[in-house]
Amino acid sequence: MNTAADFPVLAFEDDWRALEPGAFPCDYSARGEYHAVRLPGATGPWYEPIVHHRWSHPRWHVLAGPPRVLAHMAATPGGSLLVAGGAEWDDARVEIEARPLAASGGFGLAFRYRDSRRHYRIEATTHGSLRVVLVHDDARVPLARCGLHWPCGTSRRLWIEARGERFAAGVDGERLLEWGDRALALGGVALWASAPCRFGQVRVTSSAAALERACERALHTREERRRESANHPRAVRVRSLATEEFGAGRHLRFADLDGDGRPEILVPQHAPLVDGHNYPMVTALTALDLDGRVLWQTGRPAGAHERDDVCADLPVQVGDLDGDGCAEVVIASDYELRVLDGRTGEVRRTAPTPRTPRVSAPRLALGRLRHYVAEAVVPRLAARLPFVSAGPAPWFPWPEDITWRTTGDALFLCGPHTNGDAGILFKNRYSHVWAFDRDLRPLWDHEHNTGHYFAAADVEGDGHDEILSGYTLLGADGRVRWSRGDLTDHADAVAIYTPDRAPGQRRIALAAGDEGLLWLDAAGKTLARSRPGHVQRLGIGRFRDDLPGPQCMAATWWGGRGIVTMFDADGVPHLRLESPGFGLLVQPVRWTKDACDLALLSADMRHGGLMDGFGRRVVELPDDGHPEWCSAALDLFGAGRDTLVCWNPGRIDLYVPEDARGIENARRAPGWAQSHASNYGVEVRDARAGAARGGA
């Protein structure tokens, strides 16, 4: 087996002096689900791939010293990672100086790192053990273990060596473990800790041959990406609209509001209620044309201080609600449902929002007990006992609104294929759906695990749309067709599509959070399942023409964020990578005329742009100062080619493919509207079968 002398070439080294003392830049909120968060401060080559909504303060800090060290500052069940991005090695030696500061928990290194849920990890503890595990999604496969005496407050060097399928590890100059495994052939490195610990210099050394292989792989990747980029038109900015006086965050809506065949932009503003993110109320609307002219406004739009980003939906939709060929705006605001004339913003009709559902005291007490056991007790047991498996807490209809009427979370406009009188669906955050007719008369309501948004399509083949709400399929009459009560985490995104191999059948894809990614048949039975992490976002498109289509692309958030996976129509995986970027949308984009769809990652110039089905970022947005905070792609001008929209509260920029410049002057059929816009909607692109209604 190898010795340190077998790895004489320095491949990577960091002693933290390039980073400013203080907290390592982080954002553990839900903003990064669909906002391209730009972290304040320098991070060097490092990024943090783990986020958790219960983390209230940074996990990692740089201490000034001397010597300067990196400190993990918190007790973190499951651990936190800090990844050195950008390089992958096969044969290498990794070593780190570590000083544990707690009598419980662990610390160590991740190596041959592919993503936060797929790597080898060596873990040391101060209570007498050193072990190596293969992390593969939810599994922790033990590979080697031995006793170890490492007193708290003592600095020692932890190291690991890898060559091919053989490995060795030890502390200081002592070799303690040897083993073999072939699961991962190459990857990066990361630091790991689940308890307070300080890390000194980290070094990666390799042989000259192994380093040359790493350089050749990196060069090949860059050249391949450069060649593929040359086959895709550049993004050209055709509009830049100032919105400083009335701008907003993620919730823009696009529609032909005035009936002239050209799209306008509806800019809704909000005020946070109850908490800062989850229960916003619409306070103002601004209708803006693509020349920057304001057509109308309602409410009192705020200026520069309107910067509150929402980590929820906003109940605003635009569509031809009454079938007269003109768009209406439907909103929930101040405990009212309102229908506005799209041309003028005048209110046509109103109705009160539903009364807030109440939960009985005994039922609430039982729900709290079950939630505490699942969220607090089981994870701690799972961290200590290998036979205990942690999972999501059981679903419960927690009380949401403290007011007598429902604030509202999202609206869905039923299409012409919906049987019966249902015209509008209205939901609270997680547990209740109400249906109204087009005159805002209430029809029915239902309590279930709603997830974040809806999808609608003819699932049963009777010529009428059914409504998918979370894990429940409803008819337009509100009757349950089927429900998957065994899935307890809420659905972050849902989609209905038609696979090429079964053109007469519908398939359902569920981004089910910690439950993973599921494919169901029309009867709600599971066809396939994958657990790459907390699956947050979905995109259904034709990203590859050599695979059964359409393909499904997904991105994760809570836990291990930024893991992007792509599956064919049968649920077979064909791509997996981890991006350091935030706000990964994986939305299909029709960028070229005849080629496959691309996936919109974000407007971030460093990690965003458009990615192909092989994981190559083939279209980057120019370094022209464009807004990065929010982005979307849609066929804004009806030309069969998508427009990229990038915005923040102060500005909206539009980009089109370079070879399609001029489409921004086209007109389309009057009354067009993006009628199912949502922060959690799924765009379904299927040129052969048509799109299921419900995409963003």
Image (tube, rainbow, N blue to C red):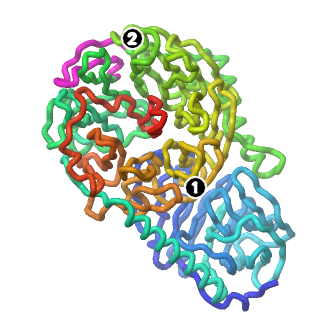
User: Residue 340, relative to residue 547: is it above or below?
Assistant: above
Amino acid type assigned to the residue bearing label 2 in the image: Asp
- Which quarter of the figure is the N terminus placed in? bottom right
Q: Secondary structure at mark 2?
A: loop
* x, y percent for residue 396: 62, 26
Residue at 47%, 24% in the rendered image: 428
Q: Is residue 326 magenta?
A: no
Residue at 73%, 41% in the rendered image: 377
Q: Can residue 151 be seen by looking at this rendering?
A: yes
User: Residue 660, relative to residue 606: is it above or below?
Assistant: above
Range drawn in magenta:
332-352
Q: How many marks?
A: 2
Q: CA distance from mark 2 to mark 1?
A: 44 Å
User: Residue 599, relative to residue 328: is it above or below?
Assistant: below
User: How many other residues sit within 10 Å of disc 1, few (<14), some (14-19) or many (≥20)?
Assistant: many
Are dots 2 and 1 in contact, CB under 8 Å? no
- The residue that disc 1 covers is 50
* x, y percent for residue 59: 56, 59
What secondary structure is the magenta-colored segment mainly? strand
* x, y percent for residue 138: 71, 50
